[in-house]
Image: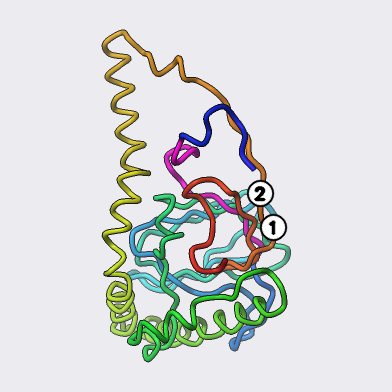
Amino acid sequence: MVSGPEHAGLPHPLPGAIGLSHLSAYDWEAADGVCGGSPHLHLVCTEAYVVTGGRGAVQTLSPDGYRDIPLEAGSIAWFTPGTVHRMVQGGDLRITVLMQNSGLPEAGDAVFTFPPELLADPDRYAAAATLPPGTGPRTAAAARRRRDLAVEGYLGLREALVAGDKGPYLEFQRAAARLVRDKVPTWRDLWRAGALATAERTGAQLDALASGEPAHLDEATAYEAAPTRLGGFGMCGRRDEYSLPGTTLPHQEE
């Protein structure tokens, strides 16, 4: 729910056209004995975790190696495009997620670390990545299967990277780029309407201030919103979402 005058005319209402959601990391144990989410990367979006409660970690794979970053209330971690990340549950972990380029993750800017044979086949990848609608047991079971497939591929990538072999990780990045290539025109449109338009609007406001005619200040107002879906199945955990344009509505899970 969002309220405020003329909110429907504002395509990306949050500051900077960011995405926003709240996550509680999965407590399902994976093959390596770790409880947590589905490892994946984003191709063009930086993601930030702001920890609001509990404890845990985020495991990352990047060209500079494998990291296990502790998370506790008040800490922040963020990772740039191409960084594989896996949220790990340590005890009641709760996170607010801030996502660059609102609308792009919801349009597919995320690729799971599935085994190579699934990454090589777009139809098989899509079947494994897509969840049934809703938040019931059937969706939960599919989300857990998806998580387990992602962990299976992730563990191989991590083992190679720790051993000093970047080859499998770099090949995963290339496979991920191939999977999303056809989506780029749509992403470009979303970026122009969201993050780019927001930055350009600031430029126009600066011009108005410099000219002494800040007419945009006449449009000042306030908004409020509350989550419209609680406990959805996200990539990293159970997700609370807002029905704000271009913010957190799932692109495959509803």
Neighbor class of circle 2 (other Cα within 10 Å; few <14, some 14-19, many 20+) is some
Neighbor class of circle 1 (other Cα within 10 Å; few <14, some 14-19, many 20+) is some
Residue underneath mark 1: 230
Q: Please, is residue 143 above or below residue 217 in the view? A: below
Please state which amino acid type lies under the numbered disc 1: Leu
User: Which percent across, then down, holds residue 188?
Assistant: 28, 54
Residue underneath mark 2: 227
User: Which percent across, then down, holds residue 121?
Assistant: 35, 87
Tell me the quarter of the picture where residue 169 sits.
bottom left
User: Which percent across, then down, holds residue 175?
Assistant: 30, 79
Residue 153 vs residue 223: left or right? left
Tell me what residue is drawn at x 30 percent, y 16 percent.
208
Q: Is residue 15 magenta?
A: yes
User: Which percent across, then down, holds residue 225?
Assistant: 63, 40
Residue 55 vs residue 84: left or right? right
The quadrant of the image that shows the N terminus is top right
Q: Residue furthest top?
A: 212
Tell me what residue is drawn at x 43 percent, y 50 percent.
102
Say what secondary structure mark 1 lies in: strand
Residue 56 vs residue 155: left or right? right
Say what secondary structure mark 2 lies in: loop
Please state which amino acid type lies under the numbered disc 2: Pro
Colour mapping used in the image: rainbow
Count all numbered tags in the image, as a single digit. Answer: 2
110 and 79: which is toward the camera? 110
Q: Please, is residue 75 above or below residue 142 in the view? A: above
Tell me the quarter of the picture where residue 105 sits.
bottom left
Tell me what residue is drawn at x 59 percent, y 52 percent.
96
Q: Please, is residue 208 above or below residue 126 in the view? A: above
Q: Which residues are magenta?
A: 10-24
Report if the CB atoms under discs 1 and 2 are less than 8 Å apart: yes
Q: Is residue 209 magenta?
A: no
